[in-house]
Image (cartoon, grey):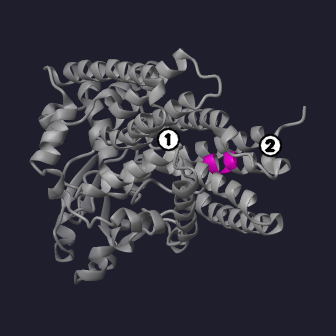
Amino acid sequence: MKLSIKSIIIFISVVVFTITATNSVGFFHADEHYQIIEFAGLKAGWNTPEDLVWEYHTKIRPTLQPTIAVGFISIFKFFGASDPYTISFLLREITALLLIFALVFFFTNTKRFIPSKKESTNSKLLEALYLGFLLLIWYIPYLGVRFSSETWSAIFLLFAMGCFCSENKSRKKILLTGLFFGLSFLFRFQILFALVGFGMWFLIFNRKNWKELLQIIGAFSLVFCFGILIDSIFYNEFTISVWNYFDQNILQHKAAEFGELPWDYYISSLFHLPTKLIGTLFFLSITSAIIFRNKAPFIWMIISFILLHMLVSHKEERFLFPIAFFFPLFFIQFFQLLMDSIPRKIALMLIGLTSLGIVTTSIVGLPILASSPAGLGRNGITRFIHLKYPNKIVNLIAMPYANPYSPWFRNEKFYLDKNVGFTPIDNFEALNSSIIKKNEINLFVTTQFFLETYPHKENIQKLGFKLIQQSIPEYQLKMDKYVRGIEDQNITYLYELKK
């Protein structure tokens, strides 16, 4: 049986996503772990309320995703999977497969928007590029395996817009649009910024179908009430977490305590972070959409999402992740515009060169991200210890903020191995024979920052410690600057005392 291009792309994406899920141990941002996995630990049995971060005590986080995590963890353990690294892999793999399904569903229902009016013979080419970009642009698998609020919110936003854009729209699909919008919101409240744009588009361009809007709002409201129920059960009292979130982070300016950035931070991020090539293509495609496709709901949603985020003083690159999965639609529609507006040969040349650049970037970026631990790679270190010393007592000597089990002086109890004990030190002078424990495996962990700035680092070698692992391998650091930009000072180094 002859395989179609679509089947081949989907198969390759499943393989790439699975490899990425296997290696992308840990988290990109602390919230991905402490406010989901550790929240789940409260119900799964390894945490108490005192172990949790302040967000739990102020009840500002939606608890649907931690509740889902508890359910999955219970199922995994029922079938004998209790190792934390196996559990976290399974959560990433489920996320990956669900996202692939959402992206293919979105593709199926939006591909009718991309055929060229002048070059119908090239529609298959645009479709293949569209699906390939949706699934395999270099950052997609890395973001797509994250069991994070950003990724799960994006998944259900994709489902919602896939339903809404269905060619054979029915009342059921309209209701599903509202339900999926609601779920997207429950995973990440800030997706409301995109829904505001959708609402504005509906009222301006689609107000004749006001019954559809009421059905969407009704379904959304049902899910919203479900979220209140889940939160109230999780927090053991009636609570509306979205109000608590607004009160703490906006009215009381709690979020601003974690840093403020200028209004144009996201403009710079959108240009630089996906690589300058893709960033440039994004701005070209968004500009063309504003001019030529300003009656499409997607442009209203994306612009609203970005502009409203720009008004919030606390900014982070991860806040943009939910919309990153929609970029390929704008790219392909920009290609379509080129084919319809300029001579065929020039259009095909520009499309070919741009696509070649994206493919080349992805050929470099995909293997790096697929073979790397998440974020700064700290949990790559903890997994290394977990696998190498499973039945041995370990004394882990750690410089400040270097302990991969407790980078911010709060233990990651989910990954914490009972055979590992900690000896914190403040400087290299304290690294001496008095803290070495006999009959134990003595490990030492530090970061590049301390190696560059603190004196007496020669004590590491004098005592007999040898480097055995680092959070990001050197070959990846050399290539990584082209696709991620990890700061070298945050790299973690693990040493073992050799007797």
Seen as rendered, the residue at the extreme front is 208
Q: Which residues are magenta?
A: 130-134
Q: Crowdedness of circle 1 by 10 Å Cα count: few (<14), some, many (20+)?
A: many
Which quarter of the figure has residue 369?
A: bottom right
Mark nearest the camera among 1 and 2 is 1
Q: Quadrant of the C terminus?
A: bottom left
Choose the circle earlier in sequence order: 1 or 2. 2
Q: Residue at x 47, y 67 (%)?
A: 271
Mark 1–mark 2 contact, CB under 8 Å? Answer: no
Task: Judge by depth and name the residue closer to the eye, 139 or 304.
Answer: 304
Q: Residue at x 19, y 39 (%)?
A: 245
Q: Amino acid at mark 2?
A: Ile
Compared to residue 27, the image places residue 464 above or below, namely: below
Seen as rendered, the residue at the extreme right is 1
Q: Secondary structure at mark 2?
A: helix
Look at mark 1 in the image and give the residue it sits on: 297
Look at mark 2 in the image and give the residue it sits on: 5
* Residue 25 can be seen in this image: no
Task: Judge by depth and name the residue closer to the eye, 17 or 352.
Answer: 352
